[in-house]
Image (tube, helix red, strand yellow):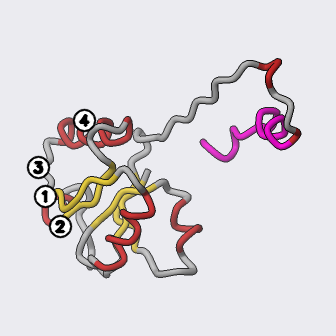
Amino acid sequence: MSFYCTGSIAEADFPAILEQRKLLVPGSRSAMGRKVFQWFDRQGLQPNILGEFDDVALMKAFARYHKDAIFLAPSLYVEEVEKDFSLQLIGDIEELREEYYVIFAERMIQHPAVKNVCDADFTDLFL
């Protein structure tokens, strides 16, 4: 996971900059939100939270119009939105990772597209 800003920040001291700017973060009731707030505690940070979001698209919209705010997104995110607007990387947090689980009854998979997804190897994508 990484912190980004749509505005420009000159020479940011990471993670101290997270206390100086307003933050857009995942909701505290989500798994990632809990991880982020625990990371803030371990770092001894008291961030100024502008908003908590359970919807990434809504957080993206807020980030676009609040150029002074910093937001958290997957590190791969920059490639997805680079064509829409420019992002400045503020800092990476290697220990914060999103986790995805798929639970299914193997005998119930009949649709070929679902079978292809289940058989695919995503280890290189989510390192």
**Cα distance between the residues tagged 4 and 3:** 11 Å
**Image coords of residue 88 (percent x, y):** 40, 73
Position of residue 76 measured from the top left corner of the image (x, y, whole percent): 55, 58
Q: Are marks 2 and 1 in contact (CB under 8 Å)?
A: yes
Q: Residues within 10 Å of mark 3 (few under 14, many from 20)?
A: few
Q: Amino acid at mark 4?
A: Gln
Mark 4 residue element = helix
Does the magenta portion include 116?
yes
Quarter occupied by residue 90: bottom left
Q: Earlier in the sequence, mark 2 or mark 4?
A: 2
Residue drawn at x 35%, y 38% is: 30
Residue linked to disc 3? 46
Q: Is residue 87 left or right of residue 63?
A: right
Q: Are marks 3 and 2 in contact (CB under 8 Å)?
A: no
Circles 4, 3 touching at the beta carbon (< 8 Å): no
Tell which of 29 and 43 is nearer to you: 29
**Amino acid type shown at disc 1:** Asn
Q: Secondary structure at mark 1?
A: strand
Magenta segment, which residues?
Answer: 113-127
Q: Which residue is mark 1?
A: 48
Q: Position of residue 2 (x, y in %)?
A: 41, 56
How far from the left and from the top, in percent, is residue 105?
73, 18
Task: Give the residue displayed 44% in from the left and 44% down from the top.
Answer: 94
